[in-house]
């Protein structure tokens, strides 16, 4: 494995068998992998160690472990390995809310239920002094049974704004999350992000 690339078929940290590239941003890659020790699927998000967001990314992952709400994908591991900073989370399958909304708006009661679930999860994060700060339909996974899971708690913001002082912006982060809840409600009812 090269210091700046990860490919299917390699093993990361002596235990995670990398399988499929699930998503990619300019700063990170998201892979489906198998934890060979516990024999279960996991997701692994990797950032190049040289990227200025690598350390804030790992710090954010450590902060996210303080939130025990089951609607957030749980962080299982976070470290440096070879040329990467990586975060391992539990694996969850489903469809992102933005893909659901491409089919049209949600019925009123379902929209309220989704937003209630997201709001309760965000409130649990805020009680643990953790903010999401990047809530949008792409970061909400709708499982096949209708349950929702939230992606990227704290880490997505660290990748987006790695130089931001998290302590100084906690109140702004909570305000951002609350504002995003209103935007999410709008999006679920009209199938368009405001």
Image: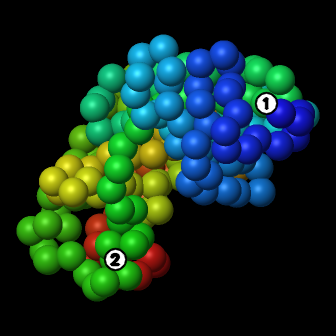
Q: Secondary structure at mark 2?
A: helix
Vertical comparison of 75 with 156: above or below? above
Q: Position of residue 138 (x, y in %)?
A: 47, 62
The disc placed on residue 84 is 1
Of tags 1 and 2, which is closer to the observer? Answer: 1
Report the front residue among 60 and 6: 6
The disc placed on residue 101 is 2
Q: Earlier in the sequence, mark 1 or mark 2?
A: 1
The disc placed on residue 186 is none
| Numbered marks: total | 2
In-image side of 144 versus 7 (left or right): left
Vertical comparison of 113 with 79: above or below? below
| Picture quarter with the N terminus | top right
Q: Residue furthest left?
A: 109
Report the front residue among 14 and 107: 14
Name the residue: 48% across, 14% down. Answer: 37
Report the front residue among 59 and 167: 59
> Could one spot residue 173 in this view of the protein?
no
Query: Rounded to the nearest whole Å, what is the CA distance between mark 1 and mark 2?
Result: 34 Å
Name the residue: 56% across, 54% down. Answer: 22
Name the residue: 59% across, 30% down. Answer: 17
Q: Secondary structure at mark 1?
A: strand
In-image side of 153 versus 18 (left or right): left
Vertical comparison of 112 with 124: above or below? below
Q: Position of residue 150 (x, y in %)?
A: 38, 46
The colour style of the image is rainbow
Quarter of the image holding residue 58? top right
Quarter of the image holding residue 125? top left
């Amino acid at each position: 494995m090269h210091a700046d690339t990860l490919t299917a078929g390699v093993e990361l940290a002596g235990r995670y068998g990398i399988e499929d590239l699930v998503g990619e941003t300019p700063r990170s890659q998201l892979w489906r992998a198998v934890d060979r020790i516990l024999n279960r699927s996991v997701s692994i998000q990797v950032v190049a160690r040289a990227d200025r967001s690598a350390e804030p990314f790992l710090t954010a992952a450590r902060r996210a472990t303080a939130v025990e709400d089951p609607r957030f994908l749980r962080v299982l591991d976070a470290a440096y390995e070879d040329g990467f900073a990586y975060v391992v989370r539990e694996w969850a399958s489903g469809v992102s809310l933005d893909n659901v909304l491409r089919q049209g708006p949600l019925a009123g009661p379902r929209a309220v239920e989704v937003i209630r679930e997201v709001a309760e999860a965000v409130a649990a994060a805020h009680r643990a002094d953790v903010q999401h700060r990047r809530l949008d339909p792409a970061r909400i996974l709708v499982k096949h049974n209708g349950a929702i899971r939230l992606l990227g708690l704290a880490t997505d913001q660290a990748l987006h704004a790695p130089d931001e002082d998290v302590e100084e912006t906690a109140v702004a982060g909570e305000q951002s999350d609350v504002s995003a809840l209103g935007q999410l409600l709008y999006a679920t009812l009209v199938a368009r992000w405001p």
